């Protein structure tokens, strides 16, 4: 038998992984890609030059392992968070990894695992249950209201009843776009018996205050997860981070792989962070475009879910999968997130949004 003939069924895969599907946002080469919530603006020339120079400098030290604790990068991230949230933080409050997906995985390795359970309100970020499965953490799906908002009272009742070891709260929520009002967040923090992971991948796009300001009140359970993949326009650089009590960082040191963040990643991320102000200037532009796209969609008779992020969940399709294909045929890649009658579109540059809106006139409803 050749290597190509071996099938997955023939491998001694863990029983609990059999029949599961991997994360799979299609990566298609079409002119307008609005499907993975990236920042559509490429890095400016000064940032590219700075990243290149930083990488050139570390290239001469690549025979050595990187700083295992990424201290300088964590200092820079803490400085950014302190300014943007007005909560004083140091590197002891911050941990970094290859994307916030790795942060979430380390959190479940440390606080989830066999015999433990994690709860999340669906629909939400599809990787939460996938990372739970990978770490053998039981996944407890909980509902949202029909309009996709979080019913905080019902949510608190469920959390008190199900007693999850890890509670995921995504704010703004992907793929629906809404964020959690601070009072609701706090009511859930009060009742949660275990760790509460507030996934703030899209926080920079939201006008709501970050959950970081609740760290002082809930230091033994709150973790705020962030990423440079979205507003920071650094998805290809793979840099996620968290803010929490220093003890949480100590816990993650028990499960992280040594030298998980390469010298190249650390240097490039630090260089990109020096340009934070210029990069984040795109946030206001994208928020304005988001509102324009949502209004235009409404004018065409689609429903849109109010969004605090850089994407919009919109509905009105009798067959969302067919509509998705029809967008692709017109050179526009959006996301079918598996919600009946709905698709999700990332806010792009104005001309990309126009192409998406043009296509929207033609796709079958
Ligand atoms: N959390 C949420 C809610 C997301 O939407 C994403 C990216 N789609 C992530 C985390 C992970 O992003 P990354 O690993 O690139 O930081």
Image (spheres, grey):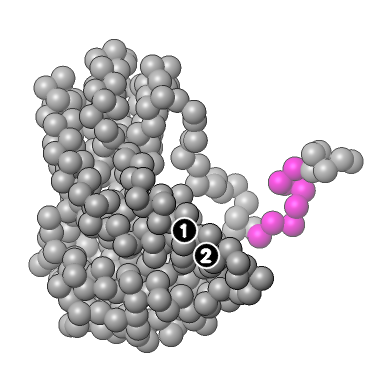
The residue closer to the viewer here, 325 or 283, is: 283
Please tell me the numbered disc located at residue 280. none
Position in image of residue 14 (x %, y %): 66, 60
Image point (29%, 81%), residue name:
90
Image quadrant occupied by the N terminus: top right
Is there CB contact under 8 Å for labels 2 and 1? yes
Judging by the rendered image, the residue that carries numbered circle 2 is: 57
Give the Cα distance between marks 2 and 1: 6 Å
Residue behind label 2 places its C-beta within 8 angstroms of ligand 1:
no
In the picture shown, does residue 213 fall above or below 204? below
Image point (87%, 40%), residue name:
2
Give the structural element (helix, strand or loop) at label 1: helix
In the image, taking residue 25 as reference, residue 226 lies left or right, namely: left
Position in image of residue 348 (x %, y %): 28, 35
Judging by the rendered image, the residue that carries numbered circle 1 is: 53
In the picture, residue 250 is in which quadrant?
Answer: bottom left
Position in image of residue 28 (x %, y %): 49, 30
Image quadrant occupied by the C terminus: top left
In the image, taking residue 49 as reference, residue 299 lies left or right, namely: left
Image point (23%, 57%), residue name:
277
Query: What segment carries the magenta color?
Result: 7-14
Prevailing SS of the magenta stretch: loop
Position in image of residue 308 (x %, y %): 18, 48
């Amino acid at each position: 038998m050749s290597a190509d003939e071996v099938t997955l069924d023939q491998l001694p895969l863990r029983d609990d992984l059999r029949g599961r599907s991997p994360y799979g946002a299609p990566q298609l080469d079409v002119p307008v890609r609005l499907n993975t919530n990236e920042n559509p603006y490429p890095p400016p020339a000064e940032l590219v030059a700075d990243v290149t120079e930083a990488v050139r400098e570390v290239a001469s030290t690549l025979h050595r392992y990187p700083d295992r604790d990424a201290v300088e990068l964590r200092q820079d991230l803490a400085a950014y968070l302190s300014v943007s949230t007005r909560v004083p933080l140091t590197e002891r409050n911050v941990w970094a990894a290859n994307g916030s997906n790795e942060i979430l995985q380390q959190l479940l390795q440390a606080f989830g695992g066999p015999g433990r359970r994690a709860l999340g309100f669906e629909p939400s970020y599809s990787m939460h249950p996938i990372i739970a499965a990978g770490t053998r953490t039981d996944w407890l799906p909980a509902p949202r209201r029909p309009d996709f908002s979080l019913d905080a009272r019902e949510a608190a009742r469920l959390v008190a009843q199900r007693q999850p070891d890890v509670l995921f709260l995504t704010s703004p929520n992907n793929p629906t776009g809404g964020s959690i009002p601070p009072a609701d967040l706090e009511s859930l923090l009060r009742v949660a018996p275990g760790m509460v992971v507030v996934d703030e991948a899209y926080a920079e796009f939201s006008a709501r205050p970050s959950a970081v300001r609740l760290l002082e009140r809930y230091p033994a359970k709150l973790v705020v997860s962030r990423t440079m993949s979205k507003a920071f326009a650094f998805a290809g650089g793979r840099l996620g981070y968290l803010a929490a009590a220093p003890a949480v960082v100590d816990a993650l040191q028990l499960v992280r792989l040594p030298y998980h963040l390469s010298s190249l990643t650390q240097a490039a991320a630090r260089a990109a962070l020096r340009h934070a102000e210029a990069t984040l200037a795109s946030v206001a532009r994208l928020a304005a475009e988001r509102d324009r796209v949502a209004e235009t969609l409404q004018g065409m008779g689609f429903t849109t879910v109010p969004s605090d992020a850089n994407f919009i969940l919109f509905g009105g399709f009798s067959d969302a999968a067919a509509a998705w294909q029809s967008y692709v045929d017109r050179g526009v890649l959006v996301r079918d997130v598996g919600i009946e009658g709905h698709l999700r579109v990332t806010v792009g540059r104005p001309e990309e949004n126009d192409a998406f809106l043009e296509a929207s006139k033609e796709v079958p409803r």
